[in-house]
């Protein structure tokens, strides 16, 4: 489509301008829309679709006709603007019709968000590699113990709790006499000695029997700076104590995990843990890379891109609620928030992720990278730059 553009402007990744289009360019869309209207028209004295075109148009709302013609032609109009200005529309356009009548020059005012036009500087020197990893004996022993616990016998006992026991505990933390929910739990499961709670709290549980309680005060410095140096008063209530009878580490144990013998189980476990460590190191490097590339271009991210990320994040929360067997309203109630509060809380990170996506896209274009399938784009770009 041939068009004329007047006063084209781009500000904060939004294009605006005036468009003039010769009637010959719009006529095919006009005729197509009119034909559809006539085909569907039902006027008194005429069978459906048989009324004269002039009579149908006389009785048809002219503004609605303009909207239909414009809607039919919009894709071609946007494509023509994109080619003239070398831009990529990413939002539904706002359009004001100045003139759109059969046989006359069409005049429009139009604006829409575009893919940000950015200038990247000095990005090719960025080299971020994953840290080296090595599986320690302690990490391996913990993982092996976790496998044993998954096949252990748990015996409810009426004796003082000791290291290695599995217990369930209710605890409440108060600051200045006020209960803090983030320092409290109605039923917290743990293996004593694993360090899931503060060491002082786990030590306080040792020696307690089922049903017994204990109180203690701790410096809030142990919990970070958020409590302003005040002490935290804890009340512990031991609900259950289970003795954990671990299965012996032998070939029979290995067979429970589809391995022929213990040596093969240990080898597979070590390999799995090593791969997990490497992936964690790669993720850390990816995160550092994403933070660094934010410094390579300054621009305002279009709201439409931010909202796309927000919708994706909200959908993930909805999927998580579904997997938990909850309606989204119940899931939000469990999180003690509302849909609007959750949406607002995600805006900042969504804006950052949208900006990272734009910068990555620009690097991919500049470097001529092509991917045949969906990939971790941050990692692929990071590794590409590492090899330059």
Image: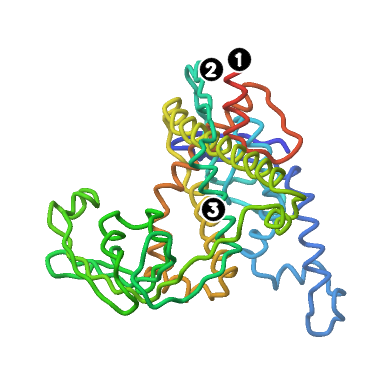
From the image, state whether disc 1 or disc 3 is nearer to you. 3
Secondary structure under tag 2 reads helix
Check the image and name the residue furthest to the bottom.
45
Q: Residue at x 70, y 73 (%)?
A: 59
Q: Position of residue 139 (x, y in %)?
A: 50, 42
Q: Quadrant of the N terminus?
A: top right
Residue at label 3? 145
> Does residue 331 appear left or right of residue 72 in this picture?
left
**Mark 3 and mark 2: Cα distance apart in space:** 45 Å
User: What residue did someone put label 2 on?
Assistant: 124
Residue 365 found in image quarter: top right
Sequence-wise, the earlier of marks 2 and 1 is: 2
Residue at label 1? 388
Residue 24: x, y in percent?
Answer: 76, 43
Residue at (40% x, 72% y) in the render: 241
Q: Is residue 31 above or below residue 24?
A: below
Image location (x, y in percent) of residue 353: 49, 42
Horizontal side of 314 relative to 266 (left or right) equals left
């Amino acid at each position: 489509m041939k068009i004329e553009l007047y006063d084209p402007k781009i500000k904060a990744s939004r294009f605006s301008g005036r468009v003039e289009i010769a009637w010959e360019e719009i006529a095919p869309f006009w005729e197509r829309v009119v034909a559809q209207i006539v085909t569907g028209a039902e006027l008194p004295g005429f069978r459906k679709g048989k009324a004269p075109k002039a009579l149908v148009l006389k009785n048809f709302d002219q503004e609605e006709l303009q909207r239909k013609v414009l809607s039919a032609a919009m894709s071609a109009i946007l494509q023509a603007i994109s080619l003239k200005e070398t831009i990529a529309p990413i939002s539904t356009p706002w359009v004001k019709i100045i003139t759109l009548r059969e046989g006359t020059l069409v005049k429009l005012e139009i604006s829409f968000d575009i893919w940000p036009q950015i200038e990247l500087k000095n990005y090719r020197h960025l080299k971020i590699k994953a840290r080296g990893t090595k599986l320690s004996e302690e990490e391996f022993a913990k993982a092996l113990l976790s496998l044993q616990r998954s096949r252990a016998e748990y015996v409810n006992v009426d004796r003082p709790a000791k290291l290695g026991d599995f217990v369930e505990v209710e605890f409440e933390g108060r600051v200045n006499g006020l209960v803090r929910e983030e320092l409290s739990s109605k039923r917290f499961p743990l293996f004593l000695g694993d360090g899931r709670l503060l060491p002082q709290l786990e030590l306080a549980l040792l020696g307690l029997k089922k049903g017994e309680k204990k109180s203690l005060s701790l410096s809030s410095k142990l919990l970070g700076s958020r409590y302003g140096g005040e002490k935290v008063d804890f009340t512990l209530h031991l609900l259950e104590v289970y003795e954990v009878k671990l299965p012996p580490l032998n070939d029979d144990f290995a067979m429970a995990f589809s391995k022929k013998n213990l040596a093969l189980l240990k080898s597979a476990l070590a390999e799995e843990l090593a791969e997990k460590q490497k992936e964690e190191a790669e993720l850390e490097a990816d995160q550092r890379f994403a933070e660094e590339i934010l410094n390579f271009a300054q621009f305002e991210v279009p709201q439409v891109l931010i909202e796309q990320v927000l919708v994706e994040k909200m959908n993930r929360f909805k999927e998580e609620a579904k997997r938990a067997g909850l309606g989204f309203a119940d899931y939000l109630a469990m999180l003690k928030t509302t849909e609007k509060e959750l949406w607002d809380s995600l805006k900042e990170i969504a804006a950052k992720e949208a900006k990272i996506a734009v910068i990555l896209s620009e690097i991919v274009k500049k470097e001529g990278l092509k991917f045949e399938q969906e990939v971790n784009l941050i990692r692929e770009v990071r590794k590409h730059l590492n090899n330059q």
